[in-house]
Amino acid sequence: MALRMWASSTANALKLSSAYRPPFSFSRSLSTVLDGLKYSDSHEWVRHEGSVATIGITDHAQGHLGEVVFVELPELGAPVSKKSAFGAVESVKATSDVNSPISGEVIEINNKLTKEAPDLVNSSPYEDGWMIKIKPSDPSELDSLMGPKEYTKFCEEEDAHH
């Protein structure tokens, strides 16, 4: 943190931008959407493997939220219900509920997000930034979620209206 502040103040003194810019710039509308996942219209994703479903927020969602500074997650064993909030994400812009795309029981939480690195939601939304793992109570609920192509189209249409 101190190094980042030093770099920022040095860049300001030299009239340089301290923001990192990758060599190729892409619009925020080109969020990463992965095959093999299911997506909700409230921008959560589900990876269903055997009797476990891993849930997090999408790259599109974290991009709109901005820098995540705090994540609130449920306790182990807590029930979650489809389309109901199970936690919250606080960013520099806003606080948003995180809804469960499917129903079940929480069997694991990502403690890294709540204790030391909430920013994993930004840097690795589909891998290190997962939020909870549940044992689904009704796996057929996955059928009502969007695949990657449908979710990409959904995001494009939603962004066009904002």
Image (spheres, rainbow, N blue to C red):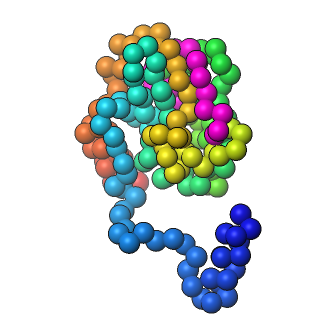
Could you say where residue 99 lies in the image, as x and y percent from the top left? Answer: 53, 29
If the image is split into quadrants, where does the C terminus sit? bottom left
Q: Is residue 1 above or below residue 56?
A: below
Q: Which residue appears at 37% of the width and 68% of the height?
A: 25
Residue 124 percent across, percent down from the top left: 49, 46
Q: Quadrant of residue 132?
A: top right
In the picture as drawn, the residue positioned furthest to the top comes out as 137
Q: Residue 83, can we see it? A: no
State which region is magenta. 99-113
- What x and y, as percent, mark residue 49? 39, 21
x and y percentages locating residue 80 in the rendered image = 56, 18
Pick whichever, 22 or 159, lies toward us: 22
Q: Note whether 33 is above or below 40 in the view shown.
A: below
| 106 to the left or right of 25 | right
Residue sticking out furthest to the right = 2
Asked whether the viewer can see residue 146, the reply is yes
Between 123 and 83, the residue placed more toward the observer is 123
